[in-house]
Image (cartoon, rainbow, N blue to C red):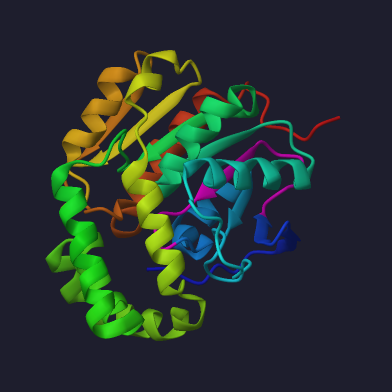
């Protein structure tokens, strides 16, 4: 769920991608990459806290929100997700940025550092995975079946069940319904959704984990019912230097349900690695 952010920002279109930047342009850059939904607005609970000391970059994934709705390449894979991050950094004149990715955004980040490790000042993966496990695969099947049976509206109505704890949904149901209606025009079409899910299902980073030297933070929710917390443990076991923050409650979208704790963890990690460049190219 996204809250309004009353902060000045700059807006641009970079190779078909809708990009917004908050905070001082000369501050360390933090690029936030959303999950399967793709909308940069997903990160609104983080913007105000991060923008105090960072240039915060939000973007809508290709095929979602206000970004280009042209058909995605076929076959579509994580390389395209990573390339879009590079295009944004290039377009903004940034040599480096701290990369923060939620789920699919984490996969984009992992693929980005595989291809361009020198462009990442750090990597944060929130409820991500190295390879989708059977439960996660089953959830994909269920979500696609809901879309096939009831279209985008039915899919959006079911979405909170996968993202949030039941008690939190009950307390915020009216706001979730309002948000669903407001975001309907920006929802990805069925072909885009299927292509993006196929890319996530095919992704397998297990062999590259031991090669990762970029400072890495893994944030996981123990009660995530979409991506089991064991997936984050696999990442942590494979990335020798990774820091791990395990939250007992918050669900898949823990940055939304528990933004205070989440923001403190993320900002603490970013401050620790503030000496890394994450600045504009000279």
**Res 233 visible:** yes
Residue at image position (51%, 20%) is 214
Residue numbers of the magenta segment: 22-37
Residue 150 drawn above or below residue 126 = below
Residue 231 in percent (x, y) is at 22, 35
Residue 242 in percent (x, y) is at 36, 21
Residue 228 drawn above or below residue 191 = above
Residue at image position (24%, 58%) is 140
Count how many numbered circles sit on residues in the image.
0
Quarter of the C terminus within the rendering: top right
Residue 148 in percent (x, y) is at 27, 77
Residue 18 drawn above or below residue 83 = below
> Is residue 102 within the magenta segment?
no
> Is residue 27 within the magenta segment?
yes
Residue 166 in percent (x, y) is at 13, 66
| 189 to the left or right of 256 | right
Q: Nearer the viewer, residue 239 or 131?
A: 131
Residue at the limit of the structure toward the front, as seen here? 74
| 278 to the left or right of 226 | right
Quarter of the N terminus within the rendering: bottom left
Q: What's the magenta bit mostly, secondary-structure-wise?
A: loop
- Using the rendered view, name the quadrant where residue 172 is placed: bottom left
Residue at image position (28%, 36%) is 131
- Using the rendered view, name the quadrant where residue 151 is placed: bottom left
- Using the rendered view, name the quadrant where residue 195 is placed: bottom left
């Amino acid at each position: 769920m996204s809250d309004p952010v009353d902060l000045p920002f700059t807006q641009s279109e970079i190779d078909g991608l809708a990009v917004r930047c908050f905070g001082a342009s000369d501050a360390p850059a933090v690029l936030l990459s959303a999950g399967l939904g793709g909308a940069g607005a997903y990160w609104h609970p983080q913007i105000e806290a991060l923008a105090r000391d960072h240039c915060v970059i939000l973007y809508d994934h290709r095929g979602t929100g206000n970004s280009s709705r042209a058909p995605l390449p076929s076959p579509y894979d994580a390389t395209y997700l990573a390339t879009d991050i590079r295009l944004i950094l290039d377009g903004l004149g940034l040599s480096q940025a701290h990369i923060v990715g939620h789920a699919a955004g984490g996969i984009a980040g992992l693929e980005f550092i595989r291809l361009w490790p020198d462009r990442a000042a750090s990597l944060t993966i929130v409820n991500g995975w190295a390879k989708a496990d059977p439960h996660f695969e089953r959830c994909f099947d269920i979500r696609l079946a809901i879309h096939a049976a009831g279209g985008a509206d039915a899919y959006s109505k079911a979405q909170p069940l996968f993202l949030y704890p039941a008690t939190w949904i009950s307390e915020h149901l009216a706001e979730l319904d309002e948000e669903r209606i407001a975001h309907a025009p920006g929802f990805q079409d069925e072909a885009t959704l299927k292509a993006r899910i196929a890319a996530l299902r095919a992704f397998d980073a297990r062999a590259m984990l031991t090669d990762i030297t970029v400072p890495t933070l893994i944030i996981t929710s123990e009660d995530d019912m979409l991506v089991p917390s064991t997936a984050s443990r696999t990442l942590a076991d494979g990335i020798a230097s990774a820091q791990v923050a395990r939250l007992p409650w918050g669900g898949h979208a823990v940055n939304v349900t528990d933004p205070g704790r989440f923001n403190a963890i993320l900002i603490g990690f970013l401050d620790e690695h503030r000496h890394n460049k994450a600045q504009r190219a000279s």
